[in-house]
Amino acid sequence: MLTEIYVKDYLAKVFYFSMKKTGNREDAEELAADISLAVLESLSGNPPPEHFSSWLWTIASRRFARWCAKRHTERENTIYRDDMNEPADDSGIDDKLLENELYSSLRRELAFIAREHRELIVAHYINSVGISELSERLNIPCGTVKTRLMRARKILKEGMDMAREFGRRSYNPENVSFVSSGNQPDGLPWKAVDRLIPKNILLEAGGNPSTPEELAMELGIALPYMEEEIKLLTNATLLKKVGNKYVTNFWIAGKETQVKIWKTERAGSKERAALMAKAIEDNYPELTELLAQTCAADDLRWYLYIMAIKRMTDDVCRDGFGYKFTRPNGGTWGFTGFELNDLIPEDNFMNDASWYGDGIKYGRYAVHRFGFTDNGSFMSSEATLLADILINGRTADSLSDAEKPVFETLTEKRFIHTDGGRIIFDIVALKPGIPDSAYSLIASHPAAKELRTMIQTLYDDIREILRDDMDKALHDMLDYYAAMFMCDIRAMLISDEAEAGVLRVPENRTAGTYLVIEKT
């Protein structure tokens, strides 16, 4: 039994210990093998140790000392190979090794005890600051300083007497992906999670309140550096302090939950796609007349299907999408994490990137599965000119000298072209009120009403899955996280429409780019 525990829970830690001690993989493999052999031989036929972990790390330390002694002898023999007949004086090797190990243990423990104890010990015993001066610095009686020093020494000694075990994340850090929503004026949350260290802090503290010391040991990071990381994440509102512990302040969806929700969503996806196709295609003649677009029919269909499924899910999930977060510097962003997962066989990411300004809505639908990750986007000046052309029916000869370079760029991007002086739009471009009228026409169809009922049922089902799987402390945000997962059914529906031949992927990757005038 202990042999299985060693192989499962300690073998990787022993290798990490060996790497830290030797500094290279080849020597680490040799040392780890030597330690493992000693452990397994000792376990065979002997009574099991009472405190397995302490027993194991005692063996590891002794084997490391023997390894050092052996390497010392090898170096001596190599350096003084011309004096092979002279006996080497190595009587002090064991004492030096033990002294070095003692100092190494002391430095290690100073790195992992709480700041108040660490700073006191460093000030008094390393920087030689007297009791009286410490009393003045801390504004406490000398007797209190002595009591705190005694307590700090006790904690330090307890740590030195045990073999601390770094957690799995110290040698096997995980990665995680994120999705955000809402206003992000100062670069948060993304600038706070652009490295593996904060990602693994958040993973470890997700639903698992942890002290700074526990996080430091799990990640194998000295406490002073961990404290700084925790401060940054707490200031960013990604970590929350609860008592003397910290817990991740947003939800990170585990692999099992992701798969469970994907299966629930995928189960009715083709039926949802068929209902949407009926609602749009039955109304398509009226929709083309209403929208009066000059772009290709394929592009128009992409817009209609994406617009319709987005509006319908927005309507069903309005409580979730409408959740108001309070963030630093006026931010209102929400944040969701996802453990990396190769168990879901499709990419359901579709980024509805929209920008607003001066009554103009412009942006693109980035449907990753179909390569729409680099389709065209607008500069503000380009959107303003396009809006003016659309609203006022301008012709090419009406362009000013300042507008002509912008117009040429729009032509190069294949957003527009000219025909006998007329300016023809090659993307979906809609005047105020037209999108609302188009969606009302689609939503009034019986198939759309049935589809909306299906989407509402799906939303309720996902909320129940999350209620079971999410940390209860985050249940007040349950609607928001359910809405984030509902975004997947948009790309899922588009995928099914393409598979059924309803949508065709156009060669012009500006498809999905749109311009909507909200007001004149």
Image: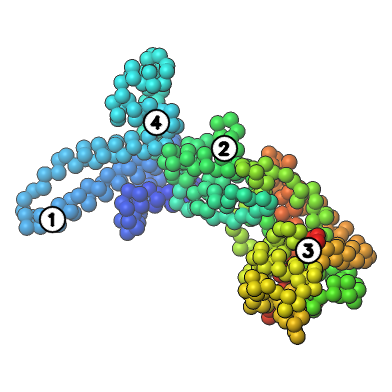
**Mark 3 secondary-structure assignment:** strand
Question: Label 1, on which residue?
Answer: 79
Q: Nearer the viewer, residue 186 or 98?
A: 186
- Quarter assignment of residue 477: top right
Q: Is residue 87 left or right of residue 127?
A: left
Provide residue 304's location: percent of width, then percent of height: 81, 69
Q: Looking at the rendered structure, which numbered label has been put on residue 118?
A: 4
Task: Look at the picture and state if 435 lies above or below 167.
Answer: below
Counting residues from the start of the chain, the first of labels 1 and 3 encountered is: 1
Image point (37%, 34%), residue name: 110
Give the number of the mark in front: 1 or 3: 3
Question: Label 3, on which residue?
Answer: 517
Counting residues from the start of the chain, the first of labels 3 and 2 encountered is: 2
Counting residues from the start of the chain, the first of labels 1 and 4 encountered is: 1
Counting residues from the start of the chain, the first of labels 3 and 4 encountered is: 4
**Separation of residues labelled 3 and 2 (CA atoms):** 46 Å
Provide residue 180's location: percent of width, then percent of height: 65, 53
Q: Looking at the rendered structure, which numbered label has been put on residue 192?
A: none
**Separation of residues labelled 1 and 4 (CA atoms):** 41 Å
Q: Quadrant of the C terminus?
A: bottom right
**Separation of residues labelled 1 and 3 (CA atoms):** 82 Å
Q: Nearer the viewer, residue 400 or 456?
A: 400
Question: Label 2, on which residue?
Answer: 246
**Mark 4 secondary-structure assignment:** helix
